[in-house]
Each structure stands twice: as structure tokens, then as C-alpha cells.
Image: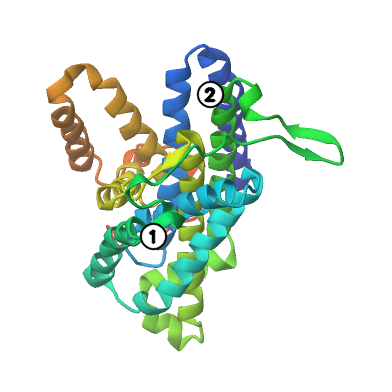
Amino acid sequence: MTPTRRKALSFATFALAYLVIVPLVLSGSPYMLGVLSMSAALSVIAMGVWVTFTIGRINLGQAAFALVGGFTAAILTTRFELSFWIALPAAGLVSALVGVVLGLGILRLRGVYFAMITLSLSETMRLALLNGGDFTGGATGITSIPVPGELSLFGLVIIPDFAGSHSHLAFYFLSAFLLLASVVLVWRLMDSRLGRVFASLQQGQELSQSLGINITKYRLIAFGVSCFLAGIGGAFFAATQQSIYPGSFVASDSISFTLYCFLGGLAYVGGPVVGAFLLTLSFQFLHDLQQYQQLAYALIMIGIMMWLPNGLLSLRWPSWGRKTTSPASGETGNVQ
């Protein structure tokens, strides 16, 4: 079996288990469905951070674009009464547009300078939304966001109204679809010529430029994809919580998204997904430790970083990833 078919088979097996077995087992546990749904949404946002790693940039401002997506969806569904199914892609596109505009200036920066300027974006966006007046709701944010309604095509109901169904299960399936679609999108992107150009930018932009590659264009594409995924995740968060505030995503969340990538494995497409699920579920399962919860959580992260510096997937599950250049190690891998 070729590596591509092996990867596709493994992904199909995972998708089947995630879409069929998990809902069957957990249908009576709204709490666990909610935790898994949120883990999936965080994975989608973290995958955007992973995309910027592929061009050699450490993006610490992903929370800002999740906020843009969340508020875009909230404003469109509450102020303009548009359907969530229109607001969801619009949130991703608006976030991508904001990212491209900002990227024109900040993507020229490298290393720690880029990381620091993106880290400040989270706080800048929070303050901007806080002073947005009635349009953004200010400190009180936007509440009473309606749950996704019915989606029909030519009279045929494709997705039923979430309000009239098992809403936790409905949000679970929506999050699962967004997660699987994001993995496929990034996977195919990295296996395309575009992905190889991204890898060349990571190796050395001067060399890429000397070969005639428009590095500004490709860096903006990567950053736009990253922000699009953040916007989609933010819109899902707003719909799930039925509210969003300027403090819903802050700078510490941006750092968490980066940690998910490191802990899962920077060299693998599935790295941020594994990292997000592991840390989110660990945090929930450690709740009984009360005041020691944060300590135990930190020890888990430190332990993984010490014993598995290339991430959990380095253990490894070859079908999950495509080996690319690891920004952390500087190694160049092979396509699996």
C-alpha cells in the first residue's frame, strides 16, 4: 500500500470512529460532548498557528483572529439576523482579510520580533472590541446569540434546527465536521506545490527569492489561511456559548494554541489536534485535584516537552502526518 493510501485509510478510520463510535458511547453525556466539541474548535484554531510555522513564523496572536471571527458571527446573527450558515464562512473570510491587511506590515518581521508583535495583537483586539460601543457591546459583549437554525436546499432539510434537536450532539457533529474539514484542507495544502513553497520559505527566504518566488504573496496566503481557521473556530465558539466578550480570547490563549502545536508535534499536520485534545481533556480530568489542578497540568506539559521534544506524534502515528521542516529542530523530513 502506498503511503498516500495508508494515510487516507488511517484518516478514514479515525473519522469513522469520531463520527460514529464516540457519539454512540457519549450521547447520554452532554458534558463530555461539550468538552470534545470545544477541543475540536481549539484544534481548528491551533491548526492555523501550525500553518504559520510552515513559513518559519511563530504566530502568538491567534486569539485576536478568533475574536474577530467570533464577533463577526455574533454581529451578523444578532444585528443583521443572518443565518449562522452564512455567518460561519463570513467569519472566516473577515478574519482572513484582517490577517492579510495586518500581514502586509508584520510579516516582514522575523523571529522574536514577529512573535512579539503578534502577541500584542491579542490585547490590541481586546481593547478595540472593548471600546466598540453598541456595535460590539463593549465590556458586556454580545449575548443571546441564536443557535444554528435549519439549513435546507431546494426544500430538502440538510441540517435540522439545533434548537429542536439534541443540541449538544448537534454541536458535536458540527465541531467534528469543522475539525475533519480543517485537517483535510491543511493536509492537502501541505502536499501541494503551495506547501512545498511554504517549506522553502521556512528554510531560507533569501534562497526562495533568488529562485523567483514571490515571498510576500506566499507568506500572505499562509497567514490568511491561518486567520481563516481562527475565524471559523471563533464563530463556532460564539454559537456554542451563545455569547462572546472581548475577554473570550486573550493573549494566554494564543500561547496555548502554540503549545498545542509543540506538544502534538510541529512536524505533523495532526500535531495541533493531538495537543489540543490532550491538554483540554487533561485539564478537565484533573478538576478533582482542585488547587493542585494547575500544578498537575503544568507538570504534564513539562514532562511531555522533556521526554518528547518532537511532540507526541513522534512516538509515532505515521498516517497522521506529513513530515516537514521542523522550526524547532531545523530538521528536514520526508513526505510519509
Residue density around tag 1, few if under 14, some if 14–19, many if 20 or more, within 10 Å? some
N-term-proximal mark, 2 vs 1: 1
Q: Is residue 154 left or right of residue 335?
A: right
Q: In front of the other: label 2 or label 1?
A: 1
Numbered tag placed on residue 168 in the rendering: 2
Residue density around tag 2, few if under 14, some if 14–19, many if 20 or more, within 10 Å? many
Q: Is residue 34 above or below residue 158?
A: above
Q: Quadrant of residue 142?
A: top left
Q: Residue at x 59, y 56 (%)?
A: 90
Q: Position of residue 228 (x, y in %)?
A: 51, 57
Q: Is residue 20 above or below residue 312?
A: above
Q: Position of residue 14 (x, y in %)?
A: 55, 31
Q: Residue at x 35, y 37 (%)?
A: 315
Q: Residue at x 37, y 79 (%)?
A: 105
Q: Quadrant of residue 108?
A: bottom left
Quarter of the image for the N terminus: give it: top right
Q: Residue furthest right?
A: 154
Near-viewer residue (47 or 45) = 45
Q: Residue at x 56, y 20 (%)?
A: 23
Numbered tag placed on residue 140 in the rendering: none
Residue named by callout 1: 132
